[in-house]
């Protein structure tokens, strides 16, 4: 897998989730079994969506970059963020703060970490085709 393919996958997933968290935050919370007692919780979900949107846009534009140092920095940042997201997903699911769908988030984060680590370890160039 090339870095370009990996970053395209990250971009598409991040933008899809971002738009859902921004546009239908209460429905997304319900999907994960999260109770929405306060309007500020909805606002926090939308802020999360805006952060995901940034990740998606950065990944989308980085996929065409020929500057390996820049792409490496982005991959390292994505790895760290995804590791933390995975830990939070596991913790929230184990504590019963989300329903079993929380495990799918943990798995998705773990797969994204593996993809980023693969790209970092192989030095896969962003311009290579798969």
Image (tube, grey):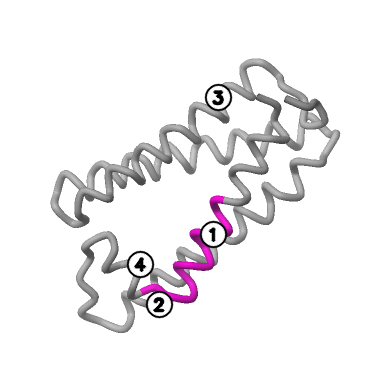
The secondary structure type at the circle numbered 2 is: helix
- Cα separation, mark 4 vs mark 1, equals 12 Å
Q: Residue 104, position in %: x, y? A: 33, 44
Q: Circle 3 sits on which residue?
A: 117
Along the line of sight, the residue nearer the viewer: 15 or 97: 15
The secondary structure type at the circle numbered 3 is: helix
Q: Circle 1 sits on which residue?
A: 16
Give the mark nearer the N terminus: 2 vs 4. Answer: 4
- Cα separation, mark 2 vs mark 4, equals 13 Å
Q: Residue 44, position in %: x, y? A: 39, 71
- Cα separation, mark 3 vs mark 2, equals 33 Å
- Cα separation, mark 2 vs mark 1, equals 18 Å
Q: Are marks 3 and 4 in contact (CB under 8 Å)?
A: no
Give the mark nearer the N terminus: 4 vs 1. Answer: 1
Q: Residue at x 36, y 37 (%)?
A: 107
User: In the image, which disc is placed on residue 28?
Assistant: 4
Q: Circle 2 sits on which residue?
A: 43
Please provide the residue range marked out in magenta. 13-25
């Amino acid at each position: 897998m090339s870095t370009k393919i990996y970053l395209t996958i990250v971009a598409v997933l991040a933008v899809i989730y971002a738009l859902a968290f921004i546009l239908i935050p209460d429905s997304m919370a319900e999907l994960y079994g999260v109770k929405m007692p306060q309007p500020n919780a909805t606002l926090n979900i939308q802020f999360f969506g805006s952060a995901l949107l940034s990740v998606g846009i950065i990944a989308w534009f980085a996929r065409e970059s020929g500057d390996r140092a820049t792409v490496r920095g982005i991959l390292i940042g994505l790895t760290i963020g995804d590791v933390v997201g995975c830990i939070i997903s596991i913790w929230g699911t184990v504590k019963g703060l989300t329903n079993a769908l929380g495990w799918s988030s943990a798995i998705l984060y773990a797969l994204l970490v593996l993809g980023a680590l693969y790209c970092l370890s192989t030095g896969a160039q962003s311009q290579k085709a798969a």
